Amino acid sequence: MTVTRADTPLRRFVADYLTSPLAVVAGLGLAVIVLLAVFAGQIAPQNPYDLGQITIFDGSLPPGELGFEGFRFWLGSDEQGRDMLSAMIYGLRISLFVSFVAVGSAVLIGLGLGLLAAWRGGSIEAIVMRTVDIQLSFPALLVALLLLAALGKGVDKVIIALILVQWAYFARTVRAAALVEIKKDYVMAARAAALPQWRILFGHVLPNVMPPVLVIATVQIANAIAIEASLSFLGVGVPITEPSLGLLIANGFDYLLSGRYWISFYPGVALLITLVCINLVGDHVRDILNPRMQS
Amino acid sequence: MLAYLIRRFSQAIFVMAVMATIVFFGLYAVGNPVDLLINPEADLAEQEATMRRLGLDRPVHVQFGYFLNGLMQGDLGTSFVHNRPALELILSRLPATLELAFLGILIAVGLGVPLGMIAGLRPEAPYSKLIMAGSVVGFSTPNFWQGLMLIMFFAVFLGWLPAGGRGDTIDVLGIPVSFLTWDGLSHLILPAVNVAIFKMSLVIRLTRAGTSEVALQDYVKYARARGLSPRRVIGVHILKNILIPVVTVLGLETGNVIAFAVVTETVFAWPGIGKLLIDSIGLLDRPVVVAYLMLTVFLFVMINLIVDIGYSLLDPRVRIKGDKA
């Protein structure tokens, strides 16, 4: 690794990141996945939910087969004659949308409550942190499952359940990091300069607690995708009209025993690749940002 | 220490009480189970009779009062669907889940610890990288899809093992178990492997991190210098010192294994408490869901309590800090 002269934190981060070929590949893979999801409508060969584009004559075709109207089903089709590749790209969009919105909201809530707890201390801190402890002592999947059993199906409800099971991770991380930062000299200096509290918190403390939050957020996005998929598989997640990757897999479950493996197999591969890419990126980012590893 | 214990116990009871309230009112909001249970052709009088029999005609707060009163006496209501006490129903399904969980953990530790040690002792070797890559994949694979793939490969493609169900059981001390008959064991293998893979990845990571750290310690160098055989150094000096974090995490993960059995049991139609929970949610069998929840809450609160007390016994700093707060 060459030492760059103008050592901005971002440039150092990028240089460190590029040292691991595996992480670079995973990062590129992740970029492709996000692009596929965002431009699903333009990229997918067919709109799997436009009934004018699918025909029952193309039902249950194995991968690579030509359809009734000369359309090639590279990854096969499902019972209704839907192109699996297209259904997966659309499913990916729903999976990513749900997890990004949920984790984004959980980060905001966690930042707010974590900073508040660290800054104010006292009973506010006690209440927030006890809630966090209780929340984190129960497995996320189970809490989300029971919440959805009470709330019912729906994309919005899955997002609510995910936010509720994830905010606590961020609140805990933010508070721990903020407690360290608040004791540092620059905060003391800002206080001495009589800056308003909100400016100290948001202008000075907040940027410095972001690195650990980003690491946790990466891991939690992978977690959110996996939990959403599991919930949809168990039948309490997204509705059938907006199938995520998890629901596609669940739909294929019924056909698995009769040998039509592709309906479950390929969405699962897509899910697995997505999760592995995110976890690899997350692992590497954590290694870079972890001060103990920078010897 | 006594003050700490009392505070910790009252905290546990408080958590149970809060959860009981949330659970009860949360499920009360779901819907009227009578709509599902009664024949739609039934007339109003029949519907009302059923409502009365199930106690659903009372106001919410009265129902809640009954619920709390029953809870104190270990009575969690009667299943609307199975017409048996909910707690009894769950306990009758519990052995299946425990059998699955324990075999899963056994496989995870039995394979995960040696693999993690291999990877930790020779971190640069190609096979170590393979093990670690495998653990990343095992870590990332969604549990339910992994189960489907196991079924696809071993049950549909190879036809070696059954795709689901529990198979023959033998009663041992009045508890039905699967692992003593070939049929039962063959039904148990795939679900247990499915439970094990995620935990195994976790164990491999922990063991590897521990091994690479411990292998550099002076007492290991000294043991080597004394001319002890590598097998003894690895099997005694290293193994003993990496087991502490592994055991701690596994203790905490046991609850998770039981919770995540929901997924595995659904995939493999394994008749444990997780399958019961999913079925009961689908049928709006409220007493069973509530009983499952209260049992799980109890289990988790107990595990946390034991772990916390264990730590406070081992590490006085936790206790002193706790006393001040």
Image (cartoon, rainbow, N blue to C red):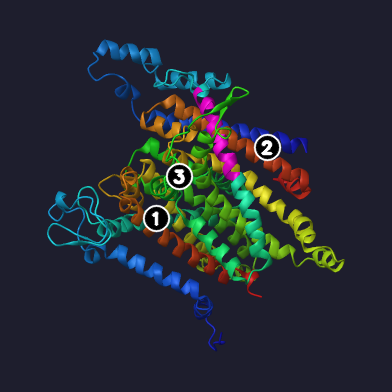
Residue situated furthest right in the rendering: B226
- Of badges 2 and 3, nearer the viewer stands 3
Left or right for B155, reference B233:
left
Q: Secondary structure at mark 1?
A: helix
Q: CA distance from mark 2 to mark 3?
A: 50 Å
Choose top left, top right, bottom left or bottom right for residue A286: bottom right
* Residue B252 x, y percent position in the rendering: 62, 45
**Contact, mark 2 vs mark 1 (Cβ under 8 Å):** no
Regarding residue A119, the answer to whether it shows in the image is no
**Magenta region's main secondary structure?**
helix
Task: Name the residue: 48% across, 20% down.
Answer: B77
- Of badges 1 and 3, nearer the viewer stands 3
Q: Secondary structure at mark 2?
A: helix
* Residue B206 x, y percent position in the rendering: 64, 57
Left or right for B307, reference A119:
right
Task: Name the residue: 63% across, 68% down.
Answer: A188
Choose top left, top right, bottom left or bottom right for residue A92: bottom left
Regarding residue A70, the answer to whether it shows in the image is yes
Q: Amino acid at mark 2?
A: Arg
> In this figure, which residue is indicated by the disc labeled 1?
A99
- Check the picture and name the quadrant holding the N terminus of chain B: top right
Who is closer to the viewer here, B211 or A229?
Answer: B211
Q: Amino acid at mark 1?
A: Ser
Question: From the viewer's perspective, is residue B97 above or below residue B82?
Answer: below
Q: Which chain does the numbered disc 3 sit on? A: B
Picture disc at residue B160? 3
Task: Name the residue: 47% across, 28% down.
Answer: B290
Crowdedness near tag 1: few (<14), some (14–19) or many (≥20) residues, C-alpha within 10 Å:
many
Q: Which chain does the numbered disc 2 sit on? A: B
Q: Residues in magenta?
A: B89-105
- Of badges 2 and 1, nearer the viewer stands 1
